[in-house]
Image (cartoon, rainbow, N blue to C red):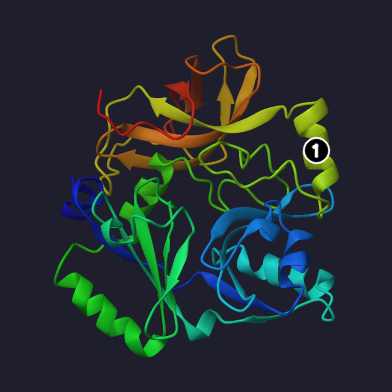
Amino acid sequence: MSAAYEAAHGSKAFVVRSDRVRIEFTGPKAAEALNGLLTNDIAKLAPGMGCYAAALTPKGKVIADVRVFARDDGRFVLDTSAAAGPGLLAMLRKYVNPRLATWRDITAEFGDVTVLGPFAASDFASLAAYGSVAANDGGFIARVPDFGLPATAMIVRPEFLEGTIRSLRAEMPELDSATAEVLRVEAGRPLWGADMDENTLAQEAALDRADLGAISFDKGCYTGQETVARVHFRGHVNRTLRGLRFHAPPTPAGDTAGANTPVPRSALRHPSQNPAGELRSIAHSPRLGLIALAYVRKEVADGEVVEVDDGHGGALGATVTALPFSTTAT
């Protein structure tokens, strides 16, 4: 196991995530405008609170998943992954009425350095998930459960970014992108562009999962609500994002020589040879072995075994599991 991975699970480590797209909303009806665009209840957020949410097409498909931070004076900061940013910005240009709220892209004005691990949030234990406090440089610090671990995101001005990184490097390991990806898959958190996109229904991506909490079923209308409500109250989706634990011995990350590693988007098969779903993100977890996120058909229960091509003409078996994965080695 890498030192950074072990530190993330045992103490703390940090990762730079400045490529995330950040957007500031202001105006007396900013909360009202956002409430009509996002799946969670923005109207309930007082300054210092926040939530996870999604922006959907009118047909209920995912344009972007967003973190929402309610700041002072009625300001809100949204941020999303780099891949989802263009779609979110296009939606805002199309749907936000400037008489209700104004918004601007502040991506270049701030960076994001996230500290994660059991000891990462000890100074901010009173903050709820996505809660935030102001920082001295004009940014803010927020609790973000993005990796399924206690974590704080420091949203800092560019002139303070390198100094912040140097200071953290003196205290703890830095996660590279590959290790951060392992932690994300362990946490079962979908990534836009890999595990969901504009063709994915919100509930297919399991954004209604309790540990994600991205959807409110009590709030008023928002774009895509009709489909979300219909699925929730009167129907179901035919597939949902779940976990796979492969039966083959794990291959160390980066060691692909002779590895039996399946390819994302490969089809899943039930032992009955019936189609069972589609593979998405794959990771070599030091604690869990080869794992993946996959869209699994509703008739396949957790605990059942499915097969997927191993990339070498054979097949790998994997057990379907609920998300998030448990990181307790078994």
- Residue 184, image x, y percentages: 41, 48
Closest to the observer, 81 or 141: 141
Closest to the observer, 246 or 262: 246
Closest to the observer, 21 or 136: 136
How many residues crowd around disc 1 within 10 Å: few (fewer than 14), some, or many (20 or more)?
Answer: some
Quadrant in which residue 283 is drawn:
top left
- Residue 317, image x, y percentages: 43, 20
Is 58 drawn above or below residue 297 in the view shown?
A: below
Is 286 drawn above or below residue 146 in the view shown?
A: above
Quadrant in which residue 55 is drawn:
bottom right
Residue at position x 83%, y 34% from top? 230
- Residue 127, image x, y percentages: 41, 57
* Residue 64 can be seen, yes or no: no
* Residue 107 can be seen, yes or no: yes
Quadrant in which residue 207 is drawn:
top right
Question: Type of residue at label 1?
Answer: Ala
Residue at position x 61%, y 62% from top? 84
Residue at position x 57%, y 54% from top? 52
Give the secondary structure at mark 1: helix
Screen quadrant of the N terminus: top left
- Residue 35, image x, y percentages: 74, 60
Q: Which residue is mark 1?
A: 229
Count how many numbered circles sit on residues in the image.
Answer: 1
Is 190 drawn above or below residue 25 in the view shown?
A: above
Residue lying farthest top?
A: 272
Q: Is residue 94 left or right of residue 326?
A: right
Is 33 drawn above or below residue 57 in the view shown?
A: below
